Image (cartoon, rainbow, N blue to C red):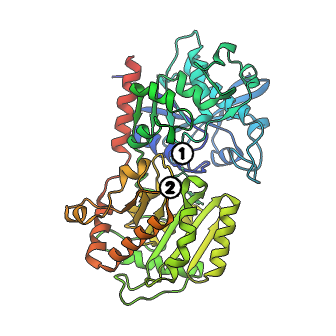
Amino acid sequence: MTKLRVLYATSEAYPLVKTGGLGDVSHALPTALRQLDVDIRILIPGYPQVLEKLSLLEIHEDLELFNYSVRILAGIMPDGLTPVYVIDCPALYQREGGPYQTAAGHDWSDNALRFGLLSKVAALFGDHEFLFKPDVVHCNDWQTGLTAAFLAYSTAPRARTLMSIHNVAYQGTFGAEMVGLLGLPPESFNMLGLEFYGMMSFLKAGLYYSDWISTVSPNYAREIQTPAFGNGLDGLLALRHDQLTGILNGVDINFWNPEADQYIFSPYTKSNLAGKRKNAQALRKKLGLSLAKADRSPTGYKPLLGVVSRLTSQKGLDLFIPIIPEIVNGAEGAQVVILGSGDQELENRLQQLAEMLPGKVSVTFGYNEELAHQIEAAADIFIMPSRFEPCGLNQMYSMRYGTIPIVRRTGGLADTVIDATPENLEQQGLATGFVFEKEDSRELLQTIKRALQAFRDKNTWRKLQQNCMNRDFSWKNSAKQYIALYSKLVQQ
Ligand code: ADP
């Protein structure tokens, strides 16, 4: 049997460049698929971060696209496993700042061109005799949405297209004039096409023109077909429900592994959690939290609550912020450690709390991979009160580190965390966290109190930690589901 050939088009991939879960997935999924013998290769824009981290790039193609000189470079990911094609177009990608935004947090004004180019090059792989001829072009989020449109209007034999939604809230909508500037036919600017209320929408293009759609959890696949979660695309998604599959993300179990994590202070295993306590103490020292001995606590210390998150309304931290004083000043005397970046107002409110509650609340702003791992290893409880959550990775990282997640019942959080009700706790290996329903601070507070009560009971806590650490979140199962999907598409 010949190998499946897949081009994985993405706007970020760890460790080259990452702003959120897409970056993690764009590294871990191709890795898992290559281990299962799929010839998958990554396509990514040549931002400075990418060019710096990939040293052995060879030039392969010189092109002229949208009046820009473009070179396609070829290299290999730093782990030596997955080939990667880089779109070198200095005028569009070589600049200080993030992949989508300026350092000051404003979207790049030419994002339609920047990601129109990414989509266009992905489409060229799909219908030209090019460097690599994929059977499937796997597109990810709005930045690659136009690929399916370019290919749908191609007259050459073409690869199949899979459009993966990592977050339907980000859609890439731009002025209608971009349709012509990007070389798409005028008839594509249609309700039955890429038009979205008078604008052009990259994501809608992907959802309308692709051969298949996937998203990152089965529950989110259902939710986005409803007005509450579909951000205006629910109608189209419901129409295409026969070609919409939810496949749960996995996690990179080597990189997120408490037994061998290079970033943490002390490794530990599920049979010996002493190292977890050392991580907590070391992190308290590093961040200036008090050392917080507590007699009634099974760890000997006060409970430590962790957050690692983008600071956007999606993540629901505005539900958590108002109750933090009550939690840290309450009977349990819990401590809170937060790492995040994003919304300025949320940052200001968190900063004020940290100043008001020294030794009890620590906040760090910015993107910090090392600290993210240290928090996962050190915390007893991880808080994710998301309003919506396509899959969510941190709750799975938390479970691997024996850190019990508190989550809202939405999207992938509902698929991955099983509430520690008395009945679920009775069943062998079942309960893994605490789940609440409403977007409501009081309900979150009640749930945190429920978790803190369980924390006091050494046996219950230990059981929860074991249940969490025994769960298999490796990519293998999910990667097999992608292979089945690719195979189905190729046979169509
Ligand atoms: P999303 O993609 O919506 O941000 P996910 O839970 O799917 O949410 O993935 C978030 C990823 O980004 C995780 O790997 C998390 O550890 C990481 N992350 C988020 N914020 C930060 C930060 N400030 N510093 C380091 N890592 C972060």
Res. 297 image quadrant: bottom left
Crowd class of label 2 (few under 14; some 14 to 19; many from 20; radius 10 Å) = many
Question: Does dot 2 land on a helix, a strand or a loop?
Answer: loop
Query: Residue at the location (52% across, 49% down)?
Result: 21
Give the quarter of the figure containing the C terminus: top left
Q: Is residue 410 above or below residue 425?
A: above
**Which of marks 2 and 1 precedes in the sequence?**
1
Q: Name the residue under label 2.
A: 386
**Ligand 1 quadrant in view:** bottom right
Q: Residue furthest left?
A: 427
Residue 199 image point, x, y percent: 69, 28
Mark 1: C-beta under 8 Å from nearest atom of ligand 1: yes
Q: What residue type is labelled 2?
A: Ser
In this view, the residue in front, 82 or 290, is 290
Asked whether the viewer can see residue 140, the reply is: yes
113 on left or right of 213: right
Q: What residue type is labelled 1?
A: Leu
Q: Name the residue under label 1.
A: 22
Query: Residue at the location (50% across, 69% down)?
Result: 306
204 on left or right of 29: right
Q: Do callouts 1 and 2 mark residues in contact (Cβ within 8 Å)?
A: no
Question: Whole-Å distance between the Cαs marked 1 and 2?
Answer: 17 Å
Crowd class of label 1 (few under 14; some 14 to 19; many from 20; radius 10 Å) = many
Query: Residue at the location (36% across, 78% down)?
Result: 274
Please name which of the two marks, 1 or 2, marks the residue nearer to the observer: 2
In this view, the residue in front, 407 or 59, is 407
The mark total stands at 2
Residue 376 image point, x, y percent: 47, 66
